[in-house]
Image (cartoon, helix red, strand yellow):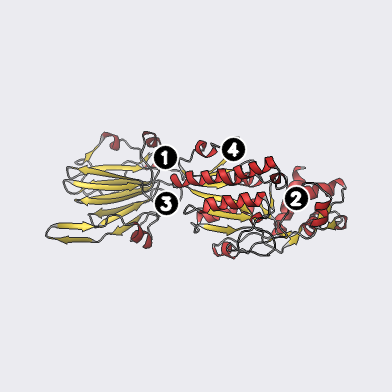
Amino acid sequence: MRETSIPGLLVLDLPVHEDERGWFKENWQREKMVAVGLPDFRPVQNNVSFNAAAGTTRGLHAEPWNKYVSVLAGQIFGAWVDLRPGPSFGAVATVQMGPDKAVFVPRGVANGFQTLASNTVYSYLVTEHWTETARAHYSYVNLADPALQICWPISLDEAVVSAADREHPLLAEARPVQPKKIIVLGGNGQLGRAFAQRAAQDARLEILTRAEADLSDPRFAEKTDLSGCSHVINAAAMTTVDHAETAAGRAEAWQVNATAVHRLAQRCAEQDVVLVQVSTDYVFDGTSANVDERHPICPMGVYGQSKAAGEQAVLAHVRNLVVRTSWVVGDGNNFVATMRRLAESGIDPLVVDDQVGRLTFASELARGILHLIDTGSAQGIYHLQGEGDAASWYQLARMVFELCGHDPDRVQPTSTAAYRASRQGIAERPGHSTFDLRKLRAEGFIGRPERILLSEYLALLADVS
């Protein structure tokens, strides 16, 4: 296999076994080809084009799917033009092909060929089923555009070319093929809002709020349109831990955090979409510190149990990711915003000092998830939380008061047991909410220091208040 001038366009040499009867080849062999570096692109449809005359020329068409092209009989001159936005837009690659070669064509790269022999048979596997509506998402570029400098072996004046192919736009007018969408569920939440902020610079992101995708609806998964989508990030959840212990809350938690996630995972698998499930430290009982991804789950309450069930539903399908996090801080109600409000209001809070963890800022969580997607990280579980020393809620509250210019001694400590005894309906919380982050760091993601992020966040709250 060799690379070309177009990123992701790969040329494979196929062994052809000949004898007096003819020849045989493995035209597509998933295990062997993935082993040498071809993407595991999972074709769903096989198309064959028979071309009676030499000089038959087709293209240049960029469809919204990956394609694996090969020749079953005859010879072709293949040409490809990158129509994806970015520095390689307009790049050209050409290959002369017989039965002993194949080419992997990534989504957004325009494909064209010219037959060099009569009775040529051209085959291609694609990763999405063709429909009439799919044609609206094609992009084209003219075979004869001088800017491409494609040296067709047979002059296009003498070639067999359809009228439609002769009328395609020049490269300067060609419509770039946009990347597949990344759907984010839970757009109303802190993480969803962080992704919404990133959407201004990342056109892939499509944010769906609860009004548009409600996991409490039993038919939510069937109603969610996954066409043209590469990933779904499920940032939606039922997170009211105390309410989850009630009869009504228990039903809601299991529907939103487990049942809906199970069906969503099935739908994503059916459509070859990667599901990224955002999970929680509550899948552990909190008796161990700095747990890694292999640590046995042991949830204490209904919320953690329902989230653990959702994890297992997601991990049952290949390619999916589970990203566990803790103590999220972003645009919305959270501990830091509450402590700042109390500090400014002259209220001296009583805060537990025996629950230890790290803050995770929603902006960093969003950045880390996209890093895992964009680097093609292996499927499975990843722990992602803030960088820095672990601290109790009490210590964090003191830090917030100090950074806001208030006396940190106004914050008073209490134990979890005393706090629960003074209030009705308080669910158990993990004593330790600290993760081992080595697996995530090995993927190349290093979070920004928590103290700096906290200062920036508090300054932002001060600006908008």
Q: Amino acid at mark 2?
A: Phe
> Label 3 amino acid?
Ser
Residue at 53% in and 46% down: 262
Report if residue 143 is visible in the image. Answer: no
Question: From the viewer's perspective, is the residue at label 3 or at label 4 nearer?
Answer: 4
- Position in image of residue 359 (x %, y %): 70, 56
Identity of the amino acid at label 4?
Answer: Asp
Q: Earlier in the sequence, mark 3 or mark 4?
A: 3
- Give the residue at mark 1: 175
Circle 1 crowding by C-alpha within 10 Å: few under 14, some 14–19, many from 20 = some
Determine which residue is flagged by label 3: 88
Query: Horizontally, is 205 left or right of 113 in the view?
Result: right
Quadrant including the N terminus: bottom left
Residue 13 sits in which quadrant? bottom left
- Looking at the rendered image, the disc whose residue lies closer to the viewer, 2 or 4, is 4
Kindly identify which residue carries mark 4.
214
Name which residue lies at 66% across and 65% down.
Answer: 290
Q: Secondary structure at mark 3?
A: loop
- The circle on residue 189 is none
